């Protein structure tokens, strides 16, 4: 998620879950080719398995960006065909690409030729008035013809004119059945369902029918749910929150010393106690800590001391 799932957020999520697959924010192919690719592609080895999401619509550019990503060590390259923002539409990519399945096919073919890792696609169930099941089927057939083996489907269509990106994440109604039907009709395609899923029982139920579940906002705002999922689905003992805080404090200290801002480092940790006593105090305390611009040592000591439920010496 743009401006959210940066490498610090992903590092924290990996401390919480050993099984989840992590995705970067969308990076445009052009930014990678013409910008500071080393900075844009940077990730920690601990993050694996991690996928790089690309935005773009020019096959050669996407191919070059996919090659850069795969050489850099990403485990998967994902093409964004779901983002509805105006900025993205003016570049003629994101969700509006759903209307051009032949171009998506060319993009994926070009990316697959240069990437040494799987190329996947994230899409919507439709756009604007092109929202019947046949439209999604045609899109899927083109993706499969290009060699796509995994399709992530946000179970809500995108309104490209008149709705903001924020409204597009809540307003058009979710239609999970359409994604489940797609899996039935394309049984050998790996189908990952996404959109509005935030409950562990719901995740387990979807996994009876589709191959995976992608969590966006829930994972960001309540990251510890990933440990609870590991426990429910794989029987993995959840790491205590205190251990996660301790390890993340060490990571943040190192990163702060390298010049990353405290607010970038503390932001992903704000949801760590979501739904638990002291959650609000923890969030506020991290906000205050970031504003104080701490030294690396102050940061480490303060994060550890601020944990809810931690006994403090009188
Ligand atoms: C702030 C924000 C940024 C997002 N950025 C991206 C993005 O870069 N790429 C993408 O494929 N989807 C992006 N999305 C969409 C989410 O990945 C997801 O499809 C959507 O939020 C629905 O899933 P959820 O209800 O689990 O959050 C973003 C969503 C939010 C809220």
Image (tube, rainbow, N blue to C red):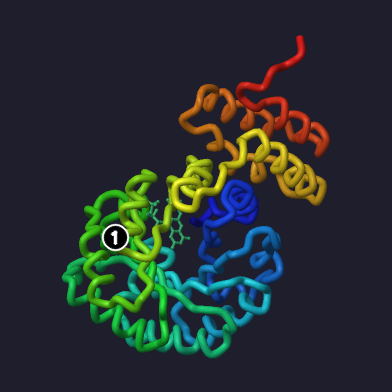
Circle 1 is placed at which residue position?
A: 155
Q: Foreground: 179 or 187?
A: 187
Q: On the rendered structure, is 75 left or right of 196?
A: right
- Secondary structure under tag 1 reads loop
Q: Is residue 82 visible from the viewing direction of this image?
A: no
Q: On the rendered structure, is 193 left or right of 128?
A: right
- Splitting the image into 4 quarters, where does residue 239 fall? top right
Q: Extreme front residue here?
A: 235
Ligand 1 location (quadrant)? bottom left
Q: How many marks?
A: 1
Question: Measured from the top left, where is residue 66 in percent x and y?
Answer: 57, 79
Q: Extreme top residue here?
A: 314
- Splitting the image into 4 quarters, where does residue 29 fall? bottom right
Task: Tell me the residue at 57%/50% (across/down).
Answer: 17
Q: Measured along the vertical axis of the image, is residue 212 above or below residue 223?
A: below
Question: Measured from the top left, where is residue 221 in percent x and y?
Answer: 48, 41
Task: Tell me the residue at 59%/54% (across/down).
Answer: 18
Q: Is residue 294 visible from the viewing direction of this image?
A: yes
Task: Tell me the residue at 58%/64% (across/down).
Answer: 50
Q: Measured along the vertical axis of the image, is residue 38 above or below residue 155?
A: below
Question: Measured from the top left, where is residue 252 in percent x and y?
Answer: 73, 44
- The quarter of the rendered structure image containing the C terminus is top right
- Splitting the image into 4 quarters, where does residue 87 fall? bottom left
Q: Foreground: 21 or 109?
A: 21
């Amino acid at each position: 998620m743009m401006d959210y799932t940066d490498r610090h957020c992903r590092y924290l999520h990996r401390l919480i879950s050993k099984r989840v697959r992590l995705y970067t924010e969308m990076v445009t192919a052009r930014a990678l080719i013409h910008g500071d690719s080393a900075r844009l592609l940077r990730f920690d080895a601990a993050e694996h398995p991690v996928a790089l999401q690309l935005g773009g619509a020019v096959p050669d550019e996407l191919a070059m960006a996919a090659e850069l990503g795969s050489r850099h060590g990403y485990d998967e390259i994902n093409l964004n065909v779901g983002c509805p923002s105006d900025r993205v539409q003016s570049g003629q990519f994101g969700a509006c690409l759903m209307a051009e399945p032949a171009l998506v096919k060319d993009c994926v073919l070009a990316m697959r030729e240069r990437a040494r890792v799987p190329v996947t696609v994230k899409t919507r169930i439709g756009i604007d008035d092109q929202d019947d099941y046949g439209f999604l089927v045609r899109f899927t057939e083109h993706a499969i013809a290009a060699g796509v083996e995994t399709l992530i489907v946000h179970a809500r269509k995108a309104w490209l004119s008149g709705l903001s990106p924020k409204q597009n994440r809540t307003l058009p109604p979710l239609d999970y059945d359409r994604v489940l039907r797609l899996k039935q009709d394309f049984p050998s395609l790996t189908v990952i369902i996404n959109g509005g899923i935030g409950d562990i029982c719901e995740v387990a139920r979807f996994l009876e029918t589709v191959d995976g579940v992608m969590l966006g906002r829930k994972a960001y705002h309540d990251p510890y749910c990933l440990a609870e999922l590991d426990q429910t689905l794989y029987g993995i003992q959840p790491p205590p929150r205190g251990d996660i805080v301790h390890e993340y404090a060490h990571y943040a200290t190192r990163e702060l010393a390298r010049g990353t801002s405290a607010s970038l480092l503390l932001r992903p940790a704000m949801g760590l106690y979501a739904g638990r006593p002291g959650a609000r105090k923890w969030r506020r305390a991290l906000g205050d800590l970031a504003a104080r611009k701490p030294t690396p040592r102050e940061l480490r000591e303060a994060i550890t001391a601020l944990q809810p439920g931690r006994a403090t010496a009188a």
